[in-house]
Amino acid sequence: MNTDDRAFLDAFHQVGKIGATGHGGVERQAGSAADGEQRRWLADLLSASGFAVNYDPIGNEFGLLELTPGAPYVLVGSHLDSQPTAGRYDGAYGVIAAAYAVLRLAEKWRDSHVAPTYNIGVVNWFNEEGSRFKPSMMGSGVFTGKIDLTAALDTTDPRGTTVRDALDAIGCRGEYDAPNIAAYAEIHIEQGRGMEKEGVTIGLVHSNWAANKYEFLVHGEQAHTGSTVIADRKDALLGASMLVVAAREIADHFDDGVLHTSVGELTVYPNSPVVVPSRVNLLLDLRSADEDVLAEADRMLHERIAKIQVSANVQIERGSAHCWPVTPYQPEGVQLAASVAADLGLRHQEVMTLAGHDSTNMKDIVPTVMLFVPSVDGISHNEQELTHDEDLVAGLTMLTAVVEKLADGALKS
């Protein structure tokens, strides 16, 4: 392993100390003090090499280097924010690899006195995870015009803190206008075990799964848990629990792996040990690579909701929804990445992404290349998340070569 690769790994593991948890993970939710600390770390790294670092109104962090005056930028990045008690690799690997890829290229171009066709920049998207503030992929959603800026800034966390106030608290709400973008690239851990199982080093993402993500509000009636007759109860938590079970049973209805469903968050009110809950907010999602399967699962879900309302004696209200279809990444970008991987001698294959990423938004506005590296045992959103150092380095080498070609106009229309 050469010195540059070791410096990258040292930097990655250094960032893993920010917001470190007791079992090898991190907690750096969007807009938190730990998020502010890692943002300052990235700003210092990039500004030391001549990159101009700025924040836009939703807190996206841009580090841009203009080598060809007036030319658009190739953006490279991911997100540094995390889930609660999360792994160190999700998102952060993509940002740090992006930073070291563009630093290597900047040094190469400066030494050779050659200017690329396009300028280059790193982006750290705000609130990709959506754990503290909903929805996920908020920063890139605002950037691409899919989410209203004011609505995003007014969004509150469970304690009532707005996105606006959280960003102001860490000094990361700016006024920078979006740069002119020619292309986008992102690298990420797979968050699945397919690549490891197949012995693949680089995944070439050609499409995303479709997803329907819903907030449901289950309305019941507050009552005493001891004295209220069971037949008289309108237990919101009972109704919510039946929704959780319904989601799993709908997944089991289809062939294994065709449909993924989950309930990841429940907020119970008043959450007292002697009170029948009067309200539960829950987030439920359905995901599939087959839109017909997703539509059928969605129909089954809403059919079950009608039955749950009767059997649990509750009312279920559908709140916000965050949905996206199966959409491909540009085939030219996949082909470009395949050619680069072959030239580097890296074993690769085309894959789909089951999870949402900022590239899911970016591919709708500019040519986008999305890459994966393997995840050990597919573990993710977990403190035990792991990708081997040699795969991290191979991904950095791959990303650097892809970005160089993008900066030279490889996907120029």
Image (spheres, rainbow, N blue to C red):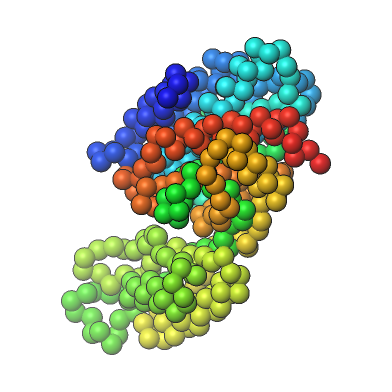
* Rendered view: 178 above or below 367: above
Residue extending farthest to the left is 226
> How many numbered circles are shown?
0
Tell me the quarter of the picture where residue 366 sits. top right
Quadrant of the snapshot with the C terminus: top right
Quadrant of the snapshot with the N terminus: top left
- Please state which of residues 223 and 243 is positioned toward the viewer in this rendering: 243
* Rendered view: 333 above or below 231: above
- Please state which of residues 122 and 343 is positioned toward the viewer in this rendering: 343
Kindly identify the residue that appears in the image at 41 percent across and 76 percent down. 252
Would you say residue 214 is visible in this rendering? Answer: no
Tell me the quarter of the picture where residue 86 sits. top left
189 displayed left or right of 230: right
Kindly identify the residue that appears in the image at 58 percent across and 48 percent down. 204
Q: What percent of the width, then of the height, locates residue 408?
A: 73, 29
65 displayed left or right of 81: right
Kindly identify the residue that appears in the image at 57 percent across and 35 percent down. 344
- Please state which of residues 177 and 231 is positioned toward the viewer in this rendering: 177
Q: What percent of the width, then of the height, locates residue 165?
A: 49, 37
193 displayed left or right of 224: right
- Please state which of residues 246 and 88 is positioned toward the viewer in this rendering: 88
Q: What percent of the width, then of the height, locates residue 310?
A: 41, 86
* Rendered view: 185 above or below 2: below
Q: What percent of the width, then of the height, locates residue 47?
A: 56, 18
